[in-house]
Image (cartoon, rainbow, N blue to C red):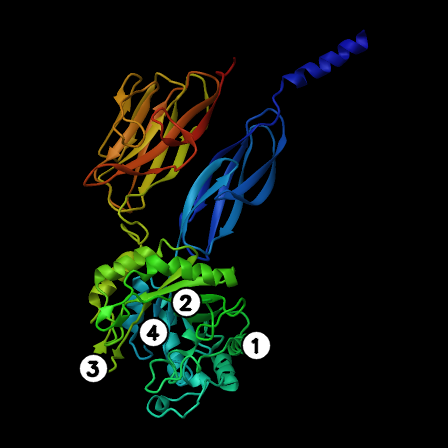
Amino acid sequence: MGIALLFIALVVPLACKAPAEFEIISIDITPPEVTAGKTVTITAQVRNMGDNEGTYIARLIADGDELETKEVTLSSGFSEVVTFTLVMDDIGTYNIAVNGSSEAFTVVPLNIMKGVSIDIPQEDFDAMRAACIDILTTQWGIEKSLEETKAFLGKAEAAGLKVVLDGGFSNAAWGFSDGDWDNLSEGKRPVWQREKVQSWVEALRNHPAVFGWDISNEAGLNFPCGDGAENPEWPDGAITLQQLKQTRADVLEIDPDKPILIRMAPWDLSKPPFQVDNPFDAGIADIVMLNVYSNWTKGNEVQFPSIIQESGAEYIRAIKAYDPDVKIWLGMAAFREPNSFQRPTASDLTRDIRSTLKLPYITGIAFFEWGPVKLANTGEDWYLPETGADLWDVIQYHIRPGPVSFQATTNPAPKVMDIHVSPSEVYLGDHAEITVEVRNNGVTAEWLTIAVSFPQNPNDVSIIEHDLSNAEVYSPGYIGWRDYGTALDYEFIYPLAEGCKSPWPGGESGHLIVRVKPEITGEFKFYVKSVAGRQPDGKCVSWKPLSGARDQQGEFVYERIIRVIPPSGD
């Protein structure tokens, strides 16, 4: 009996202890907006709310797919930050979850300026970088001297720009000269100039401004034998698939660390793609720049003004079907070329940019071209920042960061930046302060709110600080709206502390600090959200979060916990 009693005395206290119980206190993504191909850092704070030590498996899930797991062992009451890193190549907004707690971040495209002339001044490079252009590509190559090319690269480096250089793009890389445009020898075909190009790559590969190598433009459509020549031999004069494979291998033999780019034109999808006039296969390129010019003209009429939104996704999926790993840059028109390409309007370019941002698998957006360029047939100069000033304004508007970033279409975009509780553990009868910071990542909101609500219905809730237009606590019984501005009446059953700023400009942050006295021990729950509306209709058009638990108004919320312990001495 003594042994049995001793056994009971040992196990009963242990049985009263709760096992390890974990929760995600917070999840943060830095930065919340990142350029395609750059790294984001996801941090999740994990706490053991139980009485015993235990091991927790944190699972990183992106848009429903589990990417990585990490284990953390914690003693009772302790917390630890688990860190993941993630790289996404395609633009868009990604929902990231760590064991049910979620946040989102946005991937924005690389911005590329195509056809940049070799002799532009330093202020042009500075202007492009100030507008957030990332990469330049050229229309010239090994026919230029190394001295001229290094001077160009030096200006780009000084402005913080990268350059995709000729590695097989130019006429000279394929055995043509400028004289061939006027007097092309019968039967002359592209002949790969291996030694000349390799010597060029060797001389320039270590320059810090070199991003990669461009080995083909539309399979040589721009060559003297292409369809723009006086006596064209096209597509018989196209660069072949085998030649492209050899070109890639020869460039990578000298510089194996930089990406290979080719430019491709749209093709007729009613026939099998990638025939002799548009050769492509897996492993040819790391990047495909798809030239989709909505300003192509025939008989003084633009032929395909809606080509990007109508056919862009088809073209891209055809490329990805051959090579799932290739990155896609879409090149659009910001130029004119009499008889062949009509000058786009500012609304045309705006339409093309917005259409591109909706396409799948986009990594970069390229704008063609930056002069000065002497136009064929007319002798007229084209110089994007001057003769195309309205188009340059559109480009800058859509890619500069600031109050209206390029992906913020016509809607405000509330972003809950931080939820801070002080202290995170309180004695019953004491107050806790909840600070919520929100930023508008979109266009100016007609109104934008920060809201904190308490489903366990405490009596003591007050607002102690804010920098908004107004803030108020709404008690149970108040008649308010529900379901994101539907104007459906709803009687509140628990308190809501809400502040509103009207208007709330894009890019600006605001905060709300709420004091609350929990009335039960254990887990005291509260909800946080932000909702925004716009003119002219005032409808709720955006909110944060986008998923998860819902509050009494039927709207998504972040769910957080304050740990409440008995008063000291109890």
Figure quadrant of the N terminus? top right
Q: Distance between the residues labelled 2 and 1?
A: 23 Å
Q: Which of marks 3 and 1 is nearer the N terminus?
A: 1
Which label belongs to residue 253? 1
User: Residue 380's quadrant in the figure?
Assistant: bottom left
Q: Is mark 1 on a helix, strand or loop?
A: helix
Q: Name the residue under label 4.
A: 115
Q: Name the residue under label 2.
A: 289
Q: How far apart are marks 1 and 4 (CA)?
A: 26 Å
The one nearer the camera, 446 or 14, is 446
Q: How far apart are marks 3 and 1 (CA)?
A: 43 Å
Q: Which of marks 1 and 4 is nearer the N terminus?
A: 4
Mark 4 and mark 2 residues within 8 Å of each other at the beta carbon: no
Q: How far from the left and from the top, in percent, is residue 398?
A: 29, 57
Crowd tier of the residue under label 3, counting other residues whose Cα lies within 10 Å: few below 14, some 14–19, many 20 or above: few
Q: Is mark 4 on a helix, strand or loop?
A: loop
Q: Which residue is drawn at 40% across and 71% down?
A: 163
Q: Which of marks 2 and 3 is nearer the N terminus?
A: 2
Q: Say above or below: 146 vs 511.
A: below
Q: What element carries label 3?
A: loop
Give the amino acid type for the residue marked by disc 3 in the picture: Thr
68 relative to 189 in the view: left or right: right
Give the amino acid type for the residue marked by disc 2 in the picture: Met
Crowd tier of the residue under label 1, counting other residues whose Cα lies within 10 Å: few below 14, some 14–19, many 20 or above: few
116 relative to 204 in the view: left or right: left
Q: Distance between the residues labelled 2 and 3?
A: 29 Å
Mark 3 and mark 1 residues within 8 Å of each other at the beta carbon: no
Q: What element carries label 2?
A: strand
Q: How far from the left and from the top, in percent, is residue 547?
A: 41, 36
The one nearer the camera, 236 or 53, is 236
Q: Name the residue under label 3.
A: 378
Q: Residue at x 18, y 41 (%)?
A: 536
